[in-house]
Image (spheres, helix red, strand yellow):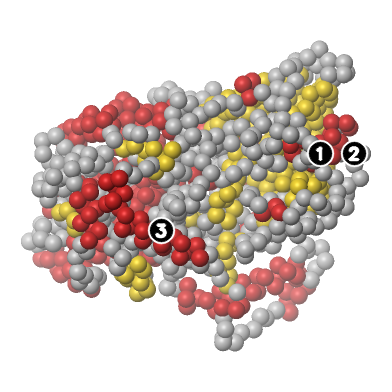
C-alpha cells in the first residue's frame, strides 16, 4: 500500500514489524497535564443578531417542536455541549458506534446511538496500576490525572476512594490515528516505564475488521530498578452508555468462557427510551508471564448490596489479584444504583526486563433504529444480530490485533517517511481521519430495514419453516440456532412485504448487478451541530478520504445519491429562511443530504433554504461520480449511475436563463456557502458547472453513449467561454451581477478547476490565469482572512499542488495545523470545526469537511486513473448536435420546477447583510 492506494499482492511477510516500545517519530503529542485553550463558540454582534432574528426564532421554535416529538433537530445549535480541548484518538472501527478517549486517559464522547452524543467522560472507566517491590515500596494510581469530576474527599466508597496519584508532567500522549500511545515515564513508580498502545481496526481497503466495534490496549512495562517488581494492571468499566444511564437499573454483568488464554467480562446494559440494546466486554490475555483475574461486579454508587468500588480497589492493593475474592455471583442492578466490572492482569517483572500485557474493549450494539425501521450494522454479518457477541469480538481483537497493526504500519509508514512533507502534514493527515470513526458514522449490512410486525397491519402473511432445514435449525451444537433461524425467516418475509415501499427510496443497492458485492450502506453526519447524514455539498470535499482508503464505501454513497436523483417526494417541508412550505424533493435534483430521521426514505432534511434550487449539488454529483469511476475503473458502477448523471445535468438546464450554456445563481445563498448570496454567473457554481459538463462528456464516452459525449463536449466549450468572462486580470470575480460583492475574492473560486484536474480532465481555465488567481487568493485570503474554513483551505492547497505550487500549498495548509492542532492553537484537535474567525471563535465543532486534507494527498500521490483520451470534432450547428439538444431539452422541460413567487423578506435581509463583506 503506497500513500493510501492499495498495492495488490501485499502479504503479511512483506509488512513491517511493529515497535512495541516506542511510538513513531512523527506523532501528535501532549503532556497529560497540558492546559490547552478551551474552544469558544462564535457570538453575534448586535447588528448580526438583529438581521438574523427572524430565522433564529424559527429555528428555535422548530428545534423545540422536533425535541417534543423525540427527534433530533437538524440544526442542533441550541443544545448545550460539553466542550473540552482534551480530545484524543477515538475507539473502534467504522460505523459501529464510537467511544472517544481524551489524551488524559478518560473515556468520553459516547456515540453509540443515532443522533445521540454524550460528551462527558465516564470516570469509572479507567486503567490503573499497582506496583510492589521486595523492599516494601508500593505504588498505586489510576493512569489518568485526577479530573475535577472526581470528588476530592475520600470518605465515600466510590471512585473517589481510588488513588489518583498520577503526575501528568511525566507522561506523554502520542496520537497517530487509528493508534495512540501513552508513555508513563516513571509514573507512578520512578523505576518503571509503562507504554500503553491503543489500536483500533481502521484498516484501509479492509471491509471486515474495519467494521468491528473494538479496541486493543497493549501495555509494555520495563523495569529499570535493581529489584523485581510485582505489577498489576487493572481495567475497570462501568455498565453505562454515558450520562445517567447507569442509574436506570436492571443491568447485570457476567464472566465469559476463557478461551485461548483470553479472560473476559460482559456487561449487559438494558437501554432506556427505546434505544437499541448494548453489551460491553472487557478482556485480558493470560500468558506464561501474566495471570488474569476478574471482579464481575462492583458497586459504583447507590445502596445495592455487593462489594463497592473501594472494596474492589483495596482487594487489588492487598492481594494484587481478585483470586481471594468470592464474587462470582452477580445480580441485576437496582434503579438508582450503578455497577461496574474489573479485570486484572498480574505479573512479576525481573530487574532490567520488559513484559507486555494486552487488554481489549468491545461493544455490541447491532441495531440502528430510525423510529419503526431497524437496520443492522456491517459487523453483524460476521458476528450475528442478537447482541450477544461483545465477548467474542473482544476475544478476537486480542488474537488478531497484531495483524491489524502490521497492516496499519504498512499503510502509514511510506507517508511518514516521505521527506517531501513538512512534519506536521502526515500527522494531521492521519489524525483528521478521526471523523470517519467519530462523525456519527453508521455502516449497515446493506439489507433493507426490518420493520415491526405492527407496521404490516392488514396484510396476510405466513412465516414458513422448510422441513429440509429443521435438522440444522434445531441442532444443539449450533448456539442460538433456533433464534437465528427464526430471525432469518422473519427478515426475509418482512423484506418481501416492504419491497414495494423500498423501491421508492434512495437505496443504491438496487443499482448493483447480480453477483456484485453489497458492501453495505454508509452514513456520516455533517457535524456535531449540523445533524444531517451524508451532506452532499460537503461530502464533495471530504470524499477524497473515502475514495482513497475505502473506495467501495464511496461507491456505495454515490449509488445512494444516484437512486435519490430518480426520486420525487411530493411531501412538504417548512423552510426556515422565509417560513414557506416547499416540496421536499424533485425528480432530477441531487438532494442536499440523505436524511436524518428516516435516511434513504425521507431525504433532504436540510431546511434553511430550498436546496432544490441550489446550483452546486448537481454539478458536484457528476464530478464525484466521474472521479470515483476513474479512481476505481468500475464500469458496472459507471453504467448503473449514468442515467442519473444525465437527468442531473438536464435538471440544471432551467437555471441557464439566457441560453448561453452557463447556469446562473438566483440572488440568494443557493450553494454550500449558505450565508452568502450569489447572483448571475458565479466563479464557484459556474466553474463547477463547466467541469461537470466535461466530466459528463467523458463518462458518456466511457459507458458507450458517444452521442451524449459529443453533445456535452460542445456544451462544455460554450460554458467555458462564459466562465472566462469573470476574469478581471487578477482573479475570477465572485459573480457578474455588478453588486458591491461581485469583485470579492473567493478562496473557492477555482473549485471546478481543482476537481477537473483531480479527475484527470482538461483544465477549465488557462494555466497562467489559474496560477495568478491562486497567488492572489494566497496573498489576500490566506494571509489576511477574517474567517478560516479548514476544509476549504485544504482543498485550496490541493489545487495549488496540482498546479505545481507545492510550497505555497503547504504554507496555506500549515495555518490550519497551527490553529487547530498545535499546542499553542485553539484546542480543536480531534474536533476540527467548520470554521473559525479572527476572534478565535469556532462554528460547528467536529465537522466533516476537514477530511479534505486527503485531497492534498490525492494531488501529491497522483494516482493512476482509468480514463480514455477522446477527441470530438463537432459544433453546435451539426445535425447530430441539434438532435441531441432537442432530446436533452425535452427531458429538461419535464424537470422544470413550478413557478414560485420570488422570495423576498429574509432573503433580501441576508443579501443586504452579506453585501460589502470580505467573504473569506
Residue occupying the point 70% across, 57% down = 248
Q: Quadrant of the C terminus?
A: top left
Task: Give the Cα separation between the discs numbered 1 and 2.
Answer: 17 Å
Instruction: Give the residue at x 85% y 45%.
Output: 307
Are the two marked residues, 1 and 3, in contact with CB atoms closer than 8 angstroms?
no
Nearest to N terminus: mark 1 or mark 3:
3
N-term-proximal mark, 3 vs 2: 3
Residue of label 2: 323
Mark 1 surroundings: few (<14), some (14-19) or many (≥20) residues within 10 A: some
Residue 281 image point, x, y percent: 72, 48
Question: Can you give x and y, in whole percent of width and height, for residue 416 in the image?
Answer: 49, 27
Position of residue 91 relative to residue 366, above or below, is above
Q: Considering the numbered disc 1 on the image, is that residue within a helix, a strand or a loop?
A: helix
Residue 645 seen in the current view:
no
Mark 1 — residue?
310
Closest to the observer, 431 or 764: 431
Residue at x 83% of width, y 56% of height: 331
Depth check: give the residue in front, 8 or 778.
778
Give the left or right position of residue 134, taking residue 772 as reference: right
In the rendered image, which residue does mark 3 sit on? 60
Q: CA distance from mark 1 to mark 3?
A: 45 Å
Alpha-carbon neighbours of circle 2 within 10 Å: few (<14), some, or many (≥20)? some
Which residue is at 88% across, 31% downward?
318
Q: Position of residue 94 (x, y in %)?
A: 55, 48
> Quarter-wise, where is residue 73 in the image?
bottom left
Q: Marks 2 and 1: in contact by CB < 8 Å?
A: no
Q: CA distance from mark 3 to mark 2?
A: 57 Å
Left or right, residue 443 beside residue 722: right
Q: Quadrant of residue 486?
A: bottom right
Amino acid at each position: 500500500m503506497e500513500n493510501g492506494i492499495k498495492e495488490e499482492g501485499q502479504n503479511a511477510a512483506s509488512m513491517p514489524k511493529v515497535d512495541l516500545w516506542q511510538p513513531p517519530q512523527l506523532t501528535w503529542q501532549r503532556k497529560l497535564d497540558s492546559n490547552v485553550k478551551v474552544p469558544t463558540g462564535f457570538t453575534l454582534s448586535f447588528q448580526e443578531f438583529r438581521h438574523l432574528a427572524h430565522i433564529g426564532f424559527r429555528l428555535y421554535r422548530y428545534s423545540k417542536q422536533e425535541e417534543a416529538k423525540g427527534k433530533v433537530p437538524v440544526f442542533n445549535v441550541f443544545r448545550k455541549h460539553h466542550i473540552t480541548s482534551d480530545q484524543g484518538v477515538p475507539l473502534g472501527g467504522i460505523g459501529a458506534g464510537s467511544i472517544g478517549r481524551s489524551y488524559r486517559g478518560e473515556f468520553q464522547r459516547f456515540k453509540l446511538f443515532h443522533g445521540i452524543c454524550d460528551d462527558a467522560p465516564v470516570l469509572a472507566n479507567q486503567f490503573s496500576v499497582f506496583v510492589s517491590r521486595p523492599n516494601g515500596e508500593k505504588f498505586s494510581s489510576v493512569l489518568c490525572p485526577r479530573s475535577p469530576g472526581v470528588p476530592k474527599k475520600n470518605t465515600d466508597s466510590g471512585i473517589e476512594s481510588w488513588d489518583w496519584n498520577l503526575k501528568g508532567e511525566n507522561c506523554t500522549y502520542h496520537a497517530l490515528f487509528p493508534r495512540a500511545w501513552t508513555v508513563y515515564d516513571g509514573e507512578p513508580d520512578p523505576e518503571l516505564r509503562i507504554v500503553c498502545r491503543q489500536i483500533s481496526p481502521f484498516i484501509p481497503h479492509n471491509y471486515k475488521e474495519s467494521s468491528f466495534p473494538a479496541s486493543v490496549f497493549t501495555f509494555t512495562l520495563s523495569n529499570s530498578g535493581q529489584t523485581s517488581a510485582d505489577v498489576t494492571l487493572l481495567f475497570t468499566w462501568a455498565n453505562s452508555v454515558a450520562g445517567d444511564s447507569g442509574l436506570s437499573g436492571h443491568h447485570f454483568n457476567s464472566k465469559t468462557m476463557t478461551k485461548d488464554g483470553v479472560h473476559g467480562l460482559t456487561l449487559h446494559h438494558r437501554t432506556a427510551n427505546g434505544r437499541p440494546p448494548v453489551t460491553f466486554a472487557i478482556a485480558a490475555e493470560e500468558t506464561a508471564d501474566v495471570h488474569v483475574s476478574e471482579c464481575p461486579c462492583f458497586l459504583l454508587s447507590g445502596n445495592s448490596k455487593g462489594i463497592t468500588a473501594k472494596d474492589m480497589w483495596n482487594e487489588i492493593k492487598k492481594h494484587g489479584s481478585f483470586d481471594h475474592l468470592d464474587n462470582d455471583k452477580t445480580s441485576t442492578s437496582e434503579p438508582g444504583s450503578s455497577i461496574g466490572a474489573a479485570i486484572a492482569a498480574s505479573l512479576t517483572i525481573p530487574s532490567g526486563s520488559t513484559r507486555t500485557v494486552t487488554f481489549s474493549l468491545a461493544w455490541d450494539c447491532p441495531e440502528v433504529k430510525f423510529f419503526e425501521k431497524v437496520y443492522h450494522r456491517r459487523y453483524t454479518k460476521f458476528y450475528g444480530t442478537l447482541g450477544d457477541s461483545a465477548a467474542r469480538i473482544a476475544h478476537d481483537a486480542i488474537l488478531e490485533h497484531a495483524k491489524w497493526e502490521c497492516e496499519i504500519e504498512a499503510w502509514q509508514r511510506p507517508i511518514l517517511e516521505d521527506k517531501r512533507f513538512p512534519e506536521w502534514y502526515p500527522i494531521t493527515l492521519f489524525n483528521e481521519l478521526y471523523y470517519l470513526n467519530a462523525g456519527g458514522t453508521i455502516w449497515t449490512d446493506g439489507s433493507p430495514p426490518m420493520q415491526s410486525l405492527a407496521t404490516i397491519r392488514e396484510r396476510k402473511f405466513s412465516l414458513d419453516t422448510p422441513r429440509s432445514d429443521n435438522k440444522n435449525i434445531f441442532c444443539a451444537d449450533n448456539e442460538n440456532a433456533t433464534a437465528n433461524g427464526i430471525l432469518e425467516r422473519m427478515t426475509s418475509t418482512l423484506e418481501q412485504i416492504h419491497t414495494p415501499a423500498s423501491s421508492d427510496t434512495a437505496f443504491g443497492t438496487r443499482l448493483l448487478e447480480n453477483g456484485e458485492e453489497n458492501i453495505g450502506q454508509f452514513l456520516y453526519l455533517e457535524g456535531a451541530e449540523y445533524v444531517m447524514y451524508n451532506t452532499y455539498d460537503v461530502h464533495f470535499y471530504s470524499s477524497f478520504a473515502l475514495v482513497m482508503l475505502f473506495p467501495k464505501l464511496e461507491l456505495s454513497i454515490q449509488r445512494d445519491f444516484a437512486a435519490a436523483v430518480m426520486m420525487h417526494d411530493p411531501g412538504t417541508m417548512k423552510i426556515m429562511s422565509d417560513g414557506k412550505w416547499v416540496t421536499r424533493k424533485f425528480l432530477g435534483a441531487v438532494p442536499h443530504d440523505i436524511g436524518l430521521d428516516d435516511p434513504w426514505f425521507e431525504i433532504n432534511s436540510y431546511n434553511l433554504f430550498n436546496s432544490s434550487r441550489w446550483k452546486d449539488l448537481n454539478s458536484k454529483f457528476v464530478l464525484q461520480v466521474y472521479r470515483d469511476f476513474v479512481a476505481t475503473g468500475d464500469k458496472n458502477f459507471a453504467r448503473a449511475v449514468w442515467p442519473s448523471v444525465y437527468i442531473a445535468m438536464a435538471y440544471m438546464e432551467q437555471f441557464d436563463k439566457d441560453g448561453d450554456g452557463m447556469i446562473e445563481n438566483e440572488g440568494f445563498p443557493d450553494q454550500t456557502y449558505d450565508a452568502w448570496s450569489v447572483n448571475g454567473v458565479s466563479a464557484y457554481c459556474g466553474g463547477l458547472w463547466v467541469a461537470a459538463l466535461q466530466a459528463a462528456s467523458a463518462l458518456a464516452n466511457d459507458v458507450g453513449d458517444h452521442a451524449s459525449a459529443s453533445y456535452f463536449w460542445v456544451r462544455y466549450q460554450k460554458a467555458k467561454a462564459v466562465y472566462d468572462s469573470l476574469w478581471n486580470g487578477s482573479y475570477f470575480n465572485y459573480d457578474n451581477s455588478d453588486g458591491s460583492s461581485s469583485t470579492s475574492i473567493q478562496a473557492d473560486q477555482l473549485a471546478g478547476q481543482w476537481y477537473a484536474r483531480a479527475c484527470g480532465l482538461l483544465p477549465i481555465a488557462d494555466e497562467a490565469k489559474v496560477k495568478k488567481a491562486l497567488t492572489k487568493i494566497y496573498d489576500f485570503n490566506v494571509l489576511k482572512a477574517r474567517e478560516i474554513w479548514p476544509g476549504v483551505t485544504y482543498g485550496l492547497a490541493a489545487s495549488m499542488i496540482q498546479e505545481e505550487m507545492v510550497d505555497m500549498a503547504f504554507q496555506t495548509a500549515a495555518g490550519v495545523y497551527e490553529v487547530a492542532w498545535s499546542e499553542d492553537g485553539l484546542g480543536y484537535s480531534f474536533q476540527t470545526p467548520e470554521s473559525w474567525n479572527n476572534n478565535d471563535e469556532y462554528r460547528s465543532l467536529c465537522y466533516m469537511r476537514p477530511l479534505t486534507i486527503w485531497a492534498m494527498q490525492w494531488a501529491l500521490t497522483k494516482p493512476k486513473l482509468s480514463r480514455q483520451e477522446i477527441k470530438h470534432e463537432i459544433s453546435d450547428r451539426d445535425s447530430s448536435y441539434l438532435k441531441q439538444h432537442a432530446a436533452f431539452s425535452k427531458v429538461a422541460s419535464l424537470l422544470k420546477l413550478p413557478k414560485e413567487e420570488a422570495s423576498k423578506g429574509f432573503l433580501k435581509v441576508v443579501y443586504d447583510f452579506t453585501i460589502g463583506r470580505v467573504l473569506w
